[in-house]
Amino acid sequence: MTRRPSSLRRGEPSLRIANPTLVAASRAIAAQREAMVRQWLTWLGDRVTSSRSIPEDVVTKELLLLIDVFGSMVGPLRRETKTIWVRVTEEYGRHAAFRGLAAGEVVEELQYLRELLIRFLAPSIAALRPRQGMALLLRLNRLVDQGVAMAVVGYTDALVVSLLPEN
């Protein structure tokens, strides 16, 4: 009788080893989180302070949350974090509507995340083998694209709710 590996025995959950490239990217994002948010706030400029309904510190915390959740989306807990990423980006879109931004501005604000990732992770990505680096860049871009799409959904939902008569 041959013995199955412990991960394949009945009744036991199977555990997968996290990809070292993704773990390294997740750690790099976490290590540079504060600098990334400072740069993001600089790029946002007056948009952050233009609304009285949502204070600047709330937007800052929201950006920190986006980066934290994004970092876990490329780390070992990416499957568990997927629904959180969808909710966080959707809520970001709702808040953008409350801040009085146009639809294109919420897209532009989340596109800054893509640029931040490229700038801050470039040294790490350049050190990888080309195939690993390309796979990581594609994954990062796909996650940003999903976030942008969900932010637009949240933004649109907020606008629809604001147009409907209250019951």
Image (spheres, rainbow, N blue to C red):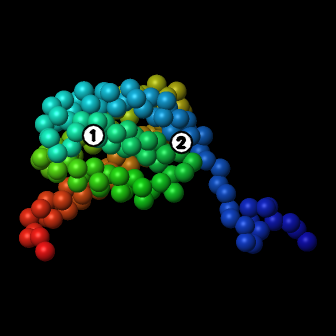
Q: Position of residue 90 (x, y in %)?
A: 29, 55
Q: Position of residue 137 (x, y in %)?
A: 42, 40
Rendered view: 57 above or below 74: above
As helix, strand or loop, the secondary structure at mark 2 comes to: helix
The part of the image, by quadrant, that contains residue 140 is top left
The residue at 27%/40% (across/down) is 59
As helix, strand or loop, the secondary structure at mark 1 comes to: helix
Residue 161 is tagged as none
The residue at 81%/65% (across/down) is 4
Residue 63 makes an appearance in the image: no
Between circles 2 and 1, the one closer to the viewer is 1
Q: Residues within 10 Å of mark 2 (few under 14, many from 20)?
A: many
The image quadrant where one finds the C terminus is bottom left
Give the Cα distance between marks 2 and 1: 27 Å
Mark sitting earlier along the chain (2/1): 2
Q: Nearer the viewer, residue 6 or 2?
A: 6
Rendered view: 141 above or below 158: above
From the image, tell me which residue sits under label 2. Answer: 22
- Mark 2 residue type: Leu
The residue at 15%/31% (across/down) is 46
Residue 34 makes an appearance in the image: yes
The residue at 39%/43% (across/down) is 65
From the image, tell me which residue sits under label 1. Answer: 59
Q: Is residue 113 left or right of residue 53?
A: right
Q: Residues within 10 Å of mark 1 (few under 14, many from 20)?
A: some
Q: Position of residue 19 (x, y in %)?
A: 59, 45
